[in-house]
Amino acid sequence: MRWSKAFSKTGLLALMLAVVGIGIFFYERQYCGAEQPARYEPQQLRQVITADSKTSRTIMWQTQAPESDAWVEYKLQGENELHRVRAQGKEFATDSGTVYQQSVTLTALEPGTVYEYRAGGGKEFSAWQTLKTDTGGAFTALIFGDSQSLDYNVWRKTAAYAYSHDPEAAFFINMGDLVDNGEQYSQWRSWFRGASGLLPQIPVAPISGNHENYSLQWKPYRGDLYLNLFDLPLNGPDGLQKQAYSYDYGDVHFSVIDTQQEELNEWQPELIASQVSWLERDLAASDKKWKIVLVHRNLFRYQDGRPNELGAALLPVIDRGNVDVVFSAHNHTYGRSAPFKNGNVASQGTIYISSGRSGDKTWSGSRAKPQEVAFDGVLDQPNYMKLTVNDGKLTVTSLKQDGKLIDTVTLTK
Ligand SMILES: [Fe+2]
């Protein structure tokens, strides 16, 4: 009895040691050893806007190991003929280690057409996803203000609600300050996770905000991580490609301006001046019926609603370019101005919309400006906007995260 008790204790101990040893062996083989298997599963799969969504689309993704044999395969929906385009691989260092990224821009697509695609390589492919090209006609887009968050589930919830209620949305815009710290890769992972219901299906058109230009030490930072993560159109001013860019969707021309002079002054002292002349040319070159300009920082002073330094530089170009709507972000509140021209409210002019916030960060200090005819501090819950362009009408509707209407305006032309 005593002997058998001693044996059972010894046996139990040996069994436990064996289980721990086997566990360590397999853990090391999986994660630590020289023979660690490469991990090629496409992660953070995303569509990114191109200058012309009728005929092209950029697809990007990450893998956990370098992949030299990466592709996008695509076909017309419901058909079998496959096309293959080789991806361009890129590696870059982050505070979470090296990121291995792939990028493909599909070209010569048919307008108004539904495709299916998958990304990957010889080892692992993503699931098949849907890709729709621009018809050149009516469309709806989703617009999200600052998504920077302590808890990115808030951003996820805003994005998921918006897309579930407008599953036909053609693409989505994020107005900058996508993340709280632009150099911290874990925040980007959280941002991608939050948008994972949309990104494989519809392209993102992001705008860089000041928080994309903060380093881990909260110092000015060039924003390399943001610029690496989104292969945006290269049609911006020399040296500022991807920070400023433009694209068409339907009958709308969108121009994106980088407003981060404060953070980027050390590297790009002519940031605003270069973009002012570029924007003048960019707007003049477009024959689209509608023109929209997208900026992160507001063009008006918070205190009295008069144009600030940025506004003084950009408003004359916006006036001359007959821009219909300017969307801004940064102050985390929603506001819509009356038509504004030559520095004042006018019967006809540009509508300025401060887009609010899609993440969890609020700012209670913001007040309505004198020219604003609609305002909501969105302190109770986040919000988002729907842009619908159809039959000579452009409608912007702002909704709370739960769908409650804040404001809507329709322009006709
Ligand atoms: Fe901001």
Image (spheres, rainbow, N blue to C red):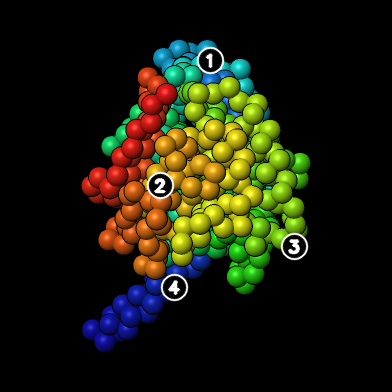
Distance of label 3 from label 1 (alpha carbons)? 43 Å
Q: Earlier in the sequence, mark 1 or mark 2?
A: 1
Q: Is mark 4 within 8 Å of ligand 1?
A: no
Mark 4 residue element:
helix
Count neighbours of disc 1 (C-alpha within 10 A) and say few if under 14, some if 14 to 19, many if 20 or more.
some
Distance of label 1 from label 2 (alpha carbons)? 38 Å
Q: Nearer the viewer, mark 2 or mark 3?
A: 2
Q: Nearer the viewer, mark 1 or mark 2?
A: 2
Q: Residue at x 35, y 29 (%)?
A: 168
Q: Earlier in the sequence, mark 4 or mark 2?
A: 4
User: How many labels sit on residues?
Assistant: 4
Q: Residue at x 53, y 15 (%)?
A: 110
Tell me where residue 268 sits by quadrant: bottom right
Q: Amino acid at mark 3?
A: Glu
Distance of label 4 from label 2 (alpha carbons)? 71 Å
**Labelled pair 4, 2 in contact (Cβ < 8 Å):** no
The vertical placement of 143 against 290, above or below, is below
Q: Earlier in the sequence, mark 4 or mark 1?
A: 4
Mark 3 residue element:
loop
**Labelled pair 4, 1 in contact (Cβ < 8 Å):** no
**Residue that carries the numbered disc 2 in the rendered image:** 337
Q: Residue at x 70, y 51 (%)?
A: 271
**Residue that carries the numbered disc 4 in the rendered image:** 17
Count neighbours of disc 4 (C-alpha within 10 A) and say few if under 14, some if 14 to 19, many if 20 or more.
few
Residue 230 is labelled as none
123 vs 348, nearest the viewer: 348
The vertical placement of 33 against 79, above or below, is below
Tell me where residue 79 sits by quadrant: top left
